[in-house]
């Protein structure tokens, strides 16, 4: 198995061989590897092409991705995403930011996320869907944490053992309370122990206060755009195409207090209409969610390689202009 710290850059070489300039994909210092509005993702085949809108790109710098871009090591384009209210906020029943960015990158995306779910939710999703055949998995669980470190570790290890050796992206948590540091420490240990796992450092990204809603936990409208973009760049371009926003089975957000979840009518890829309810949540609830609001997806024509791998030059989600906040 290739060491994820020293993966060869054969796909990047392939791009150059067919005349696709690296500058056409991203801007920045080619020697230093710094990408405008993104930061550097070292040791990987190439960087995904999702970009931040101009109003965010100048202020948001993503930390380095630890491990491989999933698309560089996956064998197909079926992507299963599992999460709690944080990831649910970018699902298609709300703003649809996840599919809006990752489907153009060639992924068949199934985002199974529900508000209020603990780490054991990963196994519940896998019990229902694993037989469908997946090529990569994203897991973002840990914001709902009862302080039992062994319970959390065991639940995560169970899911990882089932998914491995497929490539996995773990998304750590916002440290909105002191015990979230325990969750993030366990996630870092899991990443260090498994070469098929990459780490997206949402803790560092979400430390920027404007990316969180009034409750200090869930992504703000800008935060949802940044979260979806960060994940899209971490999964990169799928090895096959086209992609699709797949049917999902877990959409029960009733674990949160009534009024926290807005009434949302999806309008299509990357767009929604949101009617906000009155929040009754506490400033730091155990499990609440702030759904995404209207978004717009802009793509440019794809460039197709001889090996039938479609390269999307840039996909950007526009910043929402309004939002519903809890608390």
Image: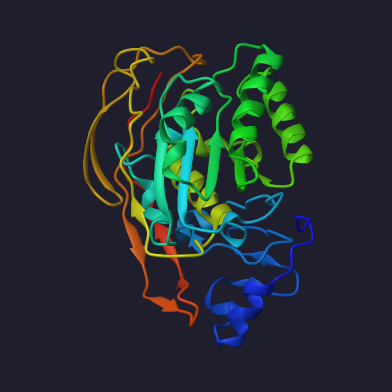
Q: Seen from this angle, which residue lies furthest front?
A: 131
Q: Quadrant of residue 273?
A: top left
Q: Is residue 282 left or right of residue 277?
A: right
From what the image shows, is residue 71 above or below residue 180?
below
Residue 275 location, x and y as percent?
22, 30
The image quadrant of residue 265 is: top left
Residue sitting at x 63%, y 67%? 46
Of 225 and 310, nearer the camera is 310
Residue 241 appears left or right of 154: left
Name the colouring of the figure. rainbow
- Answer above or below: position of 153 versus 74: above
Q: The N terminus is located in which quarter?
A: bottom right
Residue 173 location (% of width, % of height): 60, 31
Quarter holding the C terminus is top left
Of 92 and 123, which appears nearest the observer? 123
Does 101 sit left or right of 92 as displayed? right
């Amino acid at each position: 198995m290739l060491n994820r710290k020293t993966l060869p850059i054969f796909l990047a070489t392939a791009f150059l061989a067919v005349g696709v300039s690296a500058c056409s994909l991203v801007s920045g210092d080619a020697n230093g590897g710094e990408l405008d509005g993104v930061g550097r993702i070292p040791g990987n085949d190439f960087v995904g092409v999702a970009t931040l809108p101009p109003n965010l790109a100048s202020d948001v710098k993503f930390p380095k991705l630890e491990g491989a871009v999933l698309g560089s090591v996956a064998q197909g384009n079926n992507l299963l995403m599992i999460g709690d209210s944080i990831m649910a906020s970018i699902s298609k029943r709300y703003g649809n930011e996840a599919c809006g960015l990752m489907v153009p990158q060639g992924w068949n995306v199934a985002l199974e996320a529900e508000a209020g779910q603990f780490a054991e939710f990963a196994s519940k999703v896998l019990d229902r869907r694993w037989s469908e055949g997946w090529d990569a998995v994203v897991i973002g669980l840990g914001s709902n944490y009862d302080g039992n470190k062994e319970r959390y570790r065991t639940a995560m290890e169970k899911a990882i053992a089932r998914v491995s050796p497929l490539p996995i992206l773990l998304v750590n948590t916002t440290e909105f309370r002191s015990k979230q540091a325990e969750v993030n420490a366990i996630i870092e240990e899991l990443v260090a122990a498994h070469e098929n796992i990459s780490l997206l450092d949402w803790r560092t990204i979400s430390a920027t206060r404007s990316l969180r809603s009034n409750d200090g936990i869930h992504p703000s409208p800008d935060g949802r755009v940044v979260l979806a973009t960060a994940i899209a760049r971490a999964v990169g371009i799928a090895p096959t195409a086209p992609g699709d926003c797949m049917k999902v089975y877990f959409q029960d957000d009733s674990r949160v207090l009534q009024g926290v979840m807005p009434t949302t009518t999806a309008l299509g890829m990357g767009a929604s209409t949101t009617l906000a309810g009155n929040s009754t949540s506490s400033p730091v609830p155990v499990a609440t969610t702030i759904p995404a609001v209207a978004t717009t997806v802009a793509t440019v024509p794809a460039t197709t390689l001889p090996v039938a791998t479609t390269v999307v030059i840039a996909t950007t989600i526009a910043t929402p202009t309004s939002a519903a906040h809890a608390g």
